Amino acid sequence: MAVTMHDVAHRAGVSIKTVSNVVNQYPHVRPETRRRVEEAIAELGYRLNTTARNLRQGRTGMIGLALPELSLPYFAELADSVMRAAEARGVVVLIEQTGAQRDRELQALDSSHRRLTDGLLFSPLALEPEETERLEVDYPMVLLGERMFGPVDHVTMANVEAARAATLHLVERGCRRIATIGAHPGETMGSARLRFDGYRKALAEAGLPFDPDLVGDAGLWHRSTGAEAMTRLLDAGVELDGVFGMNDALALGALHVLHTRGVAVPHDVAVMGFDDVDDARYSEPLLSTIDPGREQIATTAVDLLLERIAGSQVPPRRVVADFEIVARESCLLGRTVH
Amino acid sequence: MAVTMHDVAHRAGVSIKTVSNVVNQYPHVRPETRRRVEEAIAELGYRLNTTARNLRQGRTGMIGLALPELSLPYFAELADSVMRAAEARGVVVLIEQTGAQRDRELQALDSSHRRLTDGLLFSPLALEPEETERLEVDYPMVLLGERMFGPVDHVTMANVEAARAATLHLVERGCRRIATIGAHPGETMGSARLRFDGYRKALAEAGLPFDPDLVGDAGLWHRSTGAEAMTRLLDAGVELDGVFGMNDALALGALHVLHTRGVAVPHDVAVMGFDDVDDARYSEPLLSTIDPGREQIATTAVDLLLERIAGSQVPPRRVVADFEIVARESCLLGRTVH
DNA sequence: GATTCACTCTACATCGTTGTAACCAATGGC
DNA sequence: GCCATTGGTTACAACGATGTAGAGTGAATC
């Protein structure tokens, strides 16, 4: 049926192991032999059987990526970056969706997929921070996000710092009454809490008072919830000249409402988002935001995981990605110039 | 290192093949033996080595899904559906992004991943319809979408019919001057052309004249391009009372502009989208749209592929998914009631 | 001229599973 | 009471690759 190394070896008049050596770039093969083998490979259209190699080598060459949902833009783009990073390192990514449900997150930690992958990149969203013992698994794992921490490698965004920088960016642009959208009251960890902390830190540093009226709650971080929160703020008649959306979807929703209400952005109100998703490049006006270093998070996570797979026994590491302010139209110097 | 069938067999005092029989639900095993084996499995924490099984059985248990980009909502949701359908059938999905680039689409047809999967679900977006011979591959494949057709199984949406239905839906709601957004002038196949055909068909059936001024071109089907096209139509001063967006992103962009310009939806202008992406459930007003049967497309495609993998030699099949009109706020009976 | 060494290649066992053939009991039909 | 059948199990050989050990070369070293 399919062409095997055996067929190639026969054709080239060498042993099967020599074919293997050629395929695996083993240096001590005579050029003439190599040529013959390569010819045979080409003539027969031979392709290496990865399954057999994996069995022999005891690895699968695949890593798992368990995330809440591909339909959330941040995760879709994260998956994109992870796949690219993995490809560059010669491994393949197996994506699993957990739907941000606790049982499915637990299941991902223990599914049959785990025998199919050499390790797991895990981005929990429903698991409780108290359940860290669930993360003590017997295979290599790297944790993503800020939902929880455990005795494993972990790659996170600089949530507090980046939120602080985003808020200060608005301050520098002349904003004095800065609202934030996306707060989760009562949360002790998680992105919402951390970004909120960064927001307050910036206000404190800038000597601006914190006003609870300027905080818009939003459980889900959707465009629609962002729009609703913005509407509530405007309807409440709160005076404001800046908005920090805790992610781009929220900020885009807010942008939409401001536009609708005839509030000029950035002239009357400047807006910052967080995540730098693709949509932020297509809004009107273009959304200023924080690039949380998704690319770096992806490559770092893949690298850490591959080190573990290779057998590294160093203590769990924690890496915080670099972030960058992406200044676009929605926070140009609207307020300070006049 | 890892527990193998051999260890289990030793522990249970049976042969390795008997363990295999138990694991594979072979019926002729004495209950007592089965119990002993299952105990040993539990005690040792044995997990089947999928790689070895796959090698032995000559299959990988995985199917590939090559699509343009996960960050396009339709494809993210398609991937979601495909993964669910595959899981229900005991196979795993390996996603590959082609970035809608011709060379990467060709590469996907021939990449090393192909040796890792038993078959491929392929959704091309850049390959030219003339290049159908590229689709003559030596592994099972099912084509998705309307970009091109070839000598392989194919699952598509009812583009023409559904676009016609969407347009007629607007007609029934009282619209007489219906614009469409997303046209690709000069295209001979592809969704844009087919949906445009459906639009014209509906107009003809309703006895409404076709007016080129009501056609908004949009190369990329993004929110932003939808907004731009809508803006152009309004700026041109074209009279209109309905808009058919060729996908939801375009329609949402149009909705945004209408809202901004103070045009009441659906009172002054009714709007229909196409795709029924998640966002359509969160817009203001809620977007009416076409559910193109994504779920059905996914399950059908997986089933067809699995049949081919199982060895089916029947001639290439073509399946057109059922669609449904999802009537939401943006096309309520705004125009006919007054 | 014998010894060492690097190079080139081969034979064989092995990774963990499943298919095949064959074995031994127990059952049933005639 | 014998033969055929079925049930329950096992030994062994695959699947297609790679690691190991070792056998031939020929050149360099002493």
Image (cartoon, coloured by chain):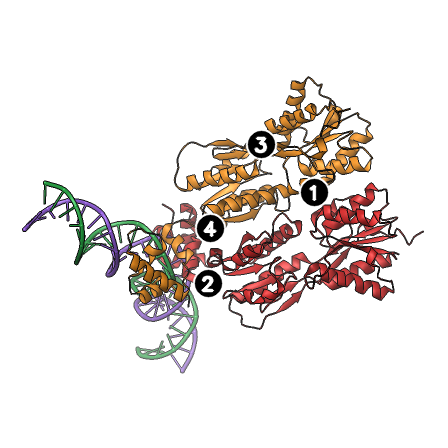
Chain colours: A red, B orange, C green, D purple
Output the chain of dot 4: B
Circle 2 or circle 3, nearest the eye = 3
The front one of C24 and B82 is C24
What residue is shown with label 3? B323
In the rendered structure, which amino acid carries the disc numbered 3? Phe
Q: Are marks 2 and 1 on the same chain?
A: no
The front one of B174 and B67 is B174
The front one of C28 and B33 is C28
What residue is shown with label 1? B282
What residue is shown with label 2? A27
Mark 4 to mark 3: distance in Å?
Answer: 34 Å
Mark 2 to mark 1: distance in Å?
Answer: 60 Å
Q: Is residue B104 visible?
A: yes
Mark 2 to mark 3: distance in Å?
Answer: 58 Å
Output the chain of dot 2: A
Q: Are marks 2 and 1 in contact (CB under 8 Å)?
A: no
Residue reaching furthest to the right = A338
Q: Are marks 1 and 4 in contact (CB under 8 Å)?
A: no
A55 to B124, vertically: above or below: below
Residue drawn at x 60%, y 30% is B159
Residue B272's x, y, as percent?
69, 32
Residue B113's x, y, as percent?
49, 49
Q: Secondary structure at mark 2?
A: loop
Q: Quadrant of the N terminus of chain B?
A: bottom left
What residue is shown with label 4? B116
In the rendered structure, which amino acid carries the disc numbered 2? Pro
